[in-house]
Image (cartoon, rainbow, N blue to C red):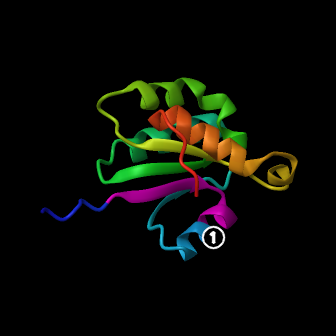
C-alpha cells in the first residue's frame, strides 16, 4: 500500500483571516490588504493557488466571491485544476445562517452524497 500524497490547504483573505488559519497549520496563503481592485486581486490569487498541484482546498471569504464567479466556475469545471474552492462565512454572517447545513449541502454538491460529522 502506498502512502497517500499530502494535499495542502490554502486561504485567500485579509490579515486576520489568514493569521487565524495559519495558526492551525495552513502554510499557503495570499493576503489581500488593500480592497482597491479587490476582484482582480482575488482572481489572480485564485488562479495562482489553483494552479499549484499540491493544493487541494482553497478557502476564500464568501463576501469576495461575487466579483469572481467566472473564475470560480472555470476552476470548478476545469480538468487541469484540481483544487476545491470553499467559501467561508465572514464576520457575524455565520450567526444568520445554518453553517452546518450550508457545508452539508455544499459537500453534497461537490461529491454527490451527504457526509455527516
Q: Position of residue 84 (x, y in %)?
A: 45, 42
At x 45%, y 25%, the residue is 74
Q: Is residue 91 above or below residue 37?
A: below
Q: Position of residue 11 (x, y in %)?
A: 53, 55
Q: Nearer the viewer, residue 16 or 4?
A: 4
Residue at disc 1, secondary structure = helix
Q: Is residue 115 above or below residue 80?
A: below
At x 87%, y 47%, the residue is 96
Toward the bottom, the furthest residue is 23
At x 69%, y 66%, the residue is 16
Which residue is tagged 1? Answer: 20
Q: Quadrant of the C terminus?
A: bottom right
Whether residue 76 appears in magenta in the rendering, the answer is: no
Which residue range is magenta in the image?
A: 7-18
Say whether residue 24 is left or right of residue 52. right
At x 51%, y 42%, the residue is 85
Q: Is residue 86 visible?
A: yes
Q: Is residue 36 visible?
A: no
Say whether residue 113 is left or right of residue 89. left
Amino acid at each position: 500500500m502506498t502512502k497517500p500524497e499530502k494535499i495542502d490547504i490554502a486561504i485567500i483573505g485579509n490579515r486576520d483571516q489568514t493569521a487565524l488559519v495559519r495558526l492551525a497549520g495552513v502554510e499557503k496563503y495570499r493576503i489581500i490588504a488593500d480592497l482597491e481592485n479587490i476582484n482582480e486581486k482575488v482572481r489572480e490569487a485564485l488562479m495562482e493557488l489553483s494552479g499549484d498541484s499540491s493544493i487541494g482546498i482553497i478557502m476564500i471569504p464568501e463576501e469576495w466571491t461575487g466579483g469572481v464567479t467566472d473564475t470560480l466556475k472555470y476552476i470548478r469545471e476545469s480538468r487541469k485544476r484540481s483544487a476545491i474552492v470553499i467559501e467561508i462565512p465572514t464576520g457575524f454572517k455565520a450567526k444568520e445562517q445554518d453553517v452546518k447545513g450550508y457545508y452539508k449541502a455544499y459537500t453534497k454538491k461537490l461529491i454527490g452524497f451527504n457526509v455527516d460529522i
